[in-house]
Amino acid sequence: MITWCLLAAGVQRSWSPGLPSGRTCGTARVVVSTRPICTGGAIVVRSLSTSSLAAGAAPVVLRVVIGLVMAAHGWQKLTMMGPANFGSDMLAGLGIPAPVAFGYLVTVTELIGGLLLIVGLLTRLATLPLIVILAVATIAVKLDIGLIAGAGAPMPGAELDLTLIAGLVAVLLLGPGRPSLDHLLGIERDVLAEEPAPA
């Protein structure tokens, strides 16, 4: 059951399926809750605000999933393709200078950067080279393929690269989330928690 609270004509009203409409909420903002509680003729709602557990888990989910994807790509280049082969076979064909050296650089960056994201260490810093690598790959390789690869395309389109870039930018802005080595070591601090409560 979902309860909505809306501000209308200066008085906040609420209703939900199966409950009488027109009851007053105790706050002055729009909130949504899946657990309405009726007390003394008023409906008390529980808000999914930015300070909730769900919102706090968002950057953690983002960085761990993206870290796993990036580390897996780096591990594949290291153990299956080989950084030198990746550089000479793929990067050289794209006109990248010193392709073998860049093959090693990309492999190490994806593997180490992905692992740093997973554990939440130097998180914001780790996102930067990964964003650069993905942006270069998108421009150099995926522009001719497009967003979604057509039938017979040599590789997927840019959809995965763009999604990963968006996720990395979000992690860069949001930080690692509280369950991280950055918080444990004091590299990141919860600024909101340190602000004094309003008088």
Image (cartoon, grey):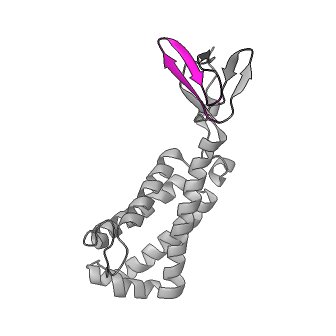
- Is 18 magenta? The answer is yes
Q: Horizontal placement of 60 versus 139: left or right?
A: right
Quadrant containing the C terminus in the rendered view: top right
34 or 172, which lies in front? 34
- Which residue occupies 59% across, 34% down? 49
Task: Answer yes or no: is residue 63 visible.
Answer: yes
Q: Is residue 79 magenta?
A: no
131 and 31: which is toward the camera: 31
155 relative to 52 in the view: left or right: left
Q: Which residues are magenta?
A: 1-19
In the picture provided, is 138 more to the left or to the right than 6? left
Residue at (51% x, 87% y) in the render: 80
Residue at the spot 30% in from the left edge and 83% down from the top edge = 92
Q: Position of residue 5 (x, y in %)?
A: 56, 24
Q: Which quadrant does the N terminus fall into?
A: top right
In this view, 146 is above or below 19: below
